[in-house]
Amino acid sequence: DRDRLIHLRAVLPCEVVVTALLHPLLGCRLAADGCTSRDGELLLTVTLPDQSRALMLASETDVFGTVVAPVVGGTVLSVTGVRRLQALLAGAGALGRVRRRPWKVVRHAPGADVFVACEEVCSTHASEEMAVRARARAKAQAVRRDKVDAKRWAWSVVCDHGGLLGAEGGGAK
């Protein structure tokens, strides 16, 4: 890290190219004129295309000489993204018919992506309003059962037209 910091101080200010495959500015050339360190990560102060200034991870650029060839005309999907796409394509034949209960109340870890870390589909509903009311009931029941365990979970209402969350939940529908 010390060598990288010395390198940064020697080359700044300079232009850098964004090389992180999942970064929205992949391939963009940005002016970098400063650096800082936070939580063990080296950050560059860069000027974005709209002329605003921002901090960017130095590892997401070619400032250290590592260049990753950008994917041209393609999209990078995670394993979860591929699974979602497969589920959507499998359900494409069902586009002609209307799903009756796309709104789901889902129990998951706080802050987690519902479609990735769904612990339980509590119930399914025909409208968002019905699902919101069911979520309030599910949370209240969990608190009555065990207050400590209820604090470990979050409940969300999601619209799942693609059927990505799988099995229909129990409870009030």
Image (spheres, rainbow, N blue to C red):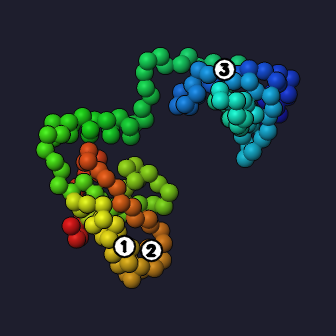
Kind of residue at disc 2: Asp
**Residue 145: percent from left, percent from top:** 37, 81
133 sits left or right of 34 in the view: left
146 vs 2: above or below: below
Snapshot quadrant of residue 43? top right
Contact between labelled residues 3 and 1, with CB atoms less than 8 Å apart: no
Q: Which residue is mark 1?
A: 136
Q: Which residue is mark 2?
A: 149
Q: Which residue is mark 3?
A: 29
17 sits left or right of 2 in the view: left
Q: Residue at x 45, y 79 (%)?
A: 147
Q: Residue at x 40, y 49 (%)?
A: 116
In space, the residues marked 2 and 1 are separated at their CA atoms by 16 Å
The image quadrant where one finds the N terminus is: top right
Kind of residue at disc 1: Ala
105 sits left or right of 93 in the view: right
**2 vs 1, front mark:** 1
